Image: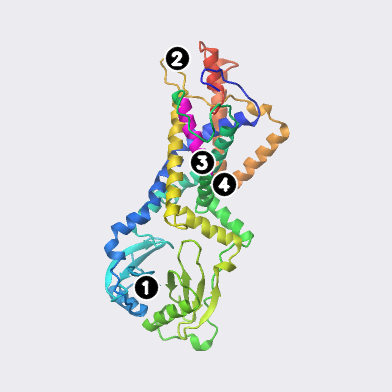
């Protein structure tokens, strides 16, 4: 349809989708913009992190490696008062070993990493590491910015709201783009026509190309959220999709009091040779990739050695090792994970840009960049669509009201049931959707009382009023 043609009013679900897409885009747009911008930066974080901390996390490979127990001893000398939690042996030539401690002043999920040269057991530095990914300070700062804007639990609401709406905004836009009337290709950007039509084309075409990425980021992002994330966890538990773990309990009485130093609370500090022996046992059990060795938590428990590589194909096997004998007493293989646990692992790793390495990062940059651009283009279309007559500041309006009356009753009931169900599972989505409806009703009531029976302002040309009220995406 050319820009000169009068707009065509259409009934059914489409006008409702336009109105939903409009309100969600306008009101949730700022949250989407922040989430996408911070996600874009996070996708670049690994390379930046490696450059910032190069002298600490990398060394020149000497071709020889001292036993991991000796490396742990060197780190212990640097941190004599810290509680030794785990060790991440050097993953390859040029990498350092990370010895992880609990120390005063650390936040939740933070550990103090002492970096040791595996060639000579010399300490290269100390940094705070965060979470299972072992993020260092710069990436940790970006991670918190992306998750909660450094505002704690309350700040997590912003990212949850964005993730809760992204999937619906993307799907609604996709449907509108492919059901709207236009002469050009839906897969190629138009470079002619009005400014609004060109902006619409960029908005629709790029959104179509990356819609699967948007849906993926929305779904995986919700697994970290406060309220919806709790529901996801409950759903996984009900479907028996929990990630299996090895048993650390040692039943052989001869192994209860091993030779490591015991603390009054029952904690143990394994002897140097026990760390070396545990790593050798894990390697013998085919744990070939990067691993983390977790110390026994108390007397009568084992080491837990787990593969921590995030690349594809996934290696996430784990073993329990008796600290005295070095015997592998329990094994969990990634192949034995329930399908839900595998999907969860793959989804999280891909969301963080780790599953397919650089390719994964590039894809995240493209999707996040498109979301940023789409939000900006959406606001630009809103501005270009505003009435230009008169001197008052006015903005573009959504599709006409009352379209739901043209939908069959059964369809309305189904839509309402879906909205309630999704709203209960995604609480921030449900609350914000209800707020949109209330806002829309208040605006409608105000305009009805102001104009009597029509939204058309006195003196406003009929064609311009109709153009404002027609669908955004035609």
Tell which tag, 3 or 4, sits nearer the viewer. 3
Query: In the rendered image, which quarter contains the C terminus?
Result: top right
Question: Range of the magenta residues?
Answer: 196-211
- Tell me the distance, in whole angstroms, between the alpha carbons under discs 3 and 4: 26 Å
Is residue 284 located in the magenta-colored stretch of the structure?
no
Q: Earlier in the sequence, mark 2 or mark 3?
A: 3
Residue 437 in view, yes or no: no
Which residue is pictured at 55% across the width and 43% down the height? 167
Q: Position of residue 425 (x, y in %)?
A: 59, 48
Q: Earlier in the sequence, mark 3 or mark 4?
A: 3
Which residue is pictured at 64% across the width and 45% down the height? 421
Query: Magenta stretch: dominant SS?
Result: helix
Label 1 neighbourhood size at 10 Å, few (<14), some (14-19), many (20+)? some
Q: Earlier in the sequence, mark 2 or mark 4?
A: 2
For label 4, the SS is loop
Label 4 neighbourhood size at 10 Å, few (<14), some (14-19), many (20+)? many
Tell which tag, 2 or 4, sits nearer the viewer. 2
- Tell me the distance, in whole angstroms, between the alpha carbons under discs 2 and 4: 42 Å
Tell which tag, 3 or 1, sits nearer the viewer. 3
**Residue, disc 2:** 389
Indicate which disc residue 83 carries: 1
Which residue is pictured at 33% across the width and 57% down the height? 49
- Tell me the distance, in whole angstroms, between the alpha carbons under discs 3 and 1: 50 Å
**Residue, disc 4:** 426
């Amino acid at each position: 349809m050319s820009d000169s043609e009068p707009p065509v009013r259409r009934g059914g679900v489409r006008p409702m989708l336009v109105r939903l897409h409009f309100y969600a885009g306008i009101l949730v747009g700022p949250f989407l913009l922040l989430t996408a911008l911070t996600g874009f930066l996070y996708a670049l974080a690994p390379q930046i992190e490696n450059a910032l901390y190069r002298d600490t996390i990398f060394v020149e490979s000497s071709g020889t490696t001292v036993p991991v127990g000796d490396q742990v001893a060197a780190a212990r000398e640097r941190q004599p008062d810290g509680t030794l939690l785990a060790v991440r042996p050097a993953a390859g030539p040029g990498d350092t070993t990370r010895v992880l401690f609990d120390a005063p002043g650390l936040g939740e999920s933070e550990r103090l990493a002492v970096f040791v040269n595996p060639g000579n057991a010399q300490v290269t530095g100390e940094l705070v590491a965060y979470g299972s990914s072992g993020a260092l300070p710069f990436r940790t700062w970006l991670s918190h910015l992306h998750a909660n804007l450094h505002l704690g639990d309350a700040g997590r609401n912003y990212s949850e709201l964005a993730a809760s709406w992204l999937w619906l905004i993307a799907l609604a836009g996709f449907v509108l783009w492919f059901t709207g009337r236009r002469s050009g290709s839906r897969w190629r950007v138009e470079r002619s026509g009005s400014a609004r039509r060109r902006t619409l084309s960029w908005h629709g075409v790029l959104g179509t190309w990356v819609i699967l990425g948007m849906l993926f980021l929305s779904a995986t992002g919700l697994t970290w959220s406060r309220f919806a994330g709790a529901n996801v966890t409950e759903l996984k538990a009900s479907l028996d999709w929990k990630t299996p773990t090895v048993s650390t309990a040692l039943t052989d009485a001869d192994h209860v009091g091993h030779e490591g130093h015991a603390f009054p609370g029952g904690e143990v500090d394994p002897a140097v040779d026990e760390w070396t022996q545990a790593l050798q046992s894990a390697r013998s059990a085919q744990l070939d990739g990067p691993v983390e060795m977790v110390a026994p938590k108390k007397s009568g428990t084992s080491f837990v050695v787990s593969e921590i590589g995030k690349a594809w194909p996934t290696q996430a096997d784990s073993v329990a090792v008796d600290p005295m004998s070095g015997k592998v007493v329990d094994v969990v293989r990634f192949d034995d994970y329930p399908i839900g646990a595998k999907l969860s692992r793959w989804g999280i790793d891909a969301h963080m840009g780790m599953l397919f390495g650089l390719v994964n990062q590039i894809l995240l940059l493209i999707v996040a960049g498109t979301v940023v651009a789409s939000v900006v283009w959406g606001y630009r279309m809103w501005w270009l669509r505003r009435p230009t007559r008169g001197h008052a500041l006015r903005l573009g309006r959504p599709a006409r009201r009352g379209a739901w009356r043209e939908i069959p009753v059964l369809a309305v009931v189904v839509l309402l049931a879906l909205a309630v169900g999704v709203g209960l599972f995604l609480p921030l989505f449900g609350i914000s959707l209800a707020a949109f409806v209330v806002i829309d009703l208040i605006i409608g009531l105000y305009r009805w009382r102001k104009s009597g029976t029509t939204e058309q302002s006195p003196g406003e040309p009929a064609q311009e009023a109709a153009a404002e009220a027609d669908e955004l995406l035609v």
